[in-house]
Image (cartoon, rainbow, N blue to C red):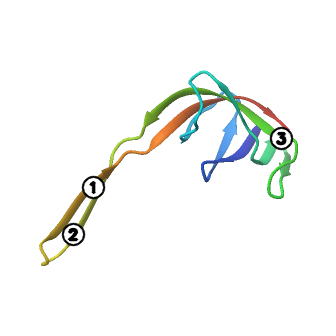
Amino acid sequence: MYAVIKTGGKQYRVAAGQKIKVEQIPADVGSEITLDQVLMVGEGESVKIGTPVVSGAAVKATVVSHGRHDKVKIFKMRRRKHYQKHQGHRQNYTEIRIEAISA
């Protein structure tokens, strides 16, 4: 069984036992969270698509860790104008483990 969930403005296809990194969620490590924005649930040939979410569907997940992604380097330059700008960015994430999908 798999589901398509929406969290942090992005969509993820998840299955039970899978670990994914999502946008930062304010929850403690080890706590269980419920993701209720389930856009689609599928099992074998049967697929249930929500309008926009599947009613009564939820995904239970456990927070594994918090961290920061690798640095993304931003470099801006205007040729012949003596303009250079260096910048870096590290996005925070929360790693979660999908425990169960209920449709």
- Left or right, 99 with respect to 20, comes to right
29 relative to 25, above or below: above
Earlier sequence position, callout 3 versus callout 1: 3
Q: How many marks overall? A: 3
Q: Looking at this view, name the residue that lies furthest to the top.
A: 30
- Left or right, 47 with respect to 65, comes to right
Q: Are marks 2 and 3 in contact (CB under 8 Å)?
A: no
In the image, residue 31 lies at what x, y percent? 64, 24
Q: Quadrant of the N terminus?
A: top right
76 relative to 57, above or below: below
- Left or right, 3 with respect to 102, comes to left
**Residue identified by numbered label 1:** 87
Viewer-closest of 98 and 45: 98
Looking at the rendered structure, the secondary structure element under dot 3 is loop
**Residue identified by numbered label 2:** 77
Q: Are marks 1 and 2 in contact (CB under 8 Å)?
A: no
In the image, residue 85 lies at what x, y percent? 22, 62
Earlier sequence position, callout 1 versus callout 2: 2
Please name the residue shown 87% across and 42% down the image: 56
Viewer-closest of 90 and 3: 90
| Residue 15, picture quadrant | top right
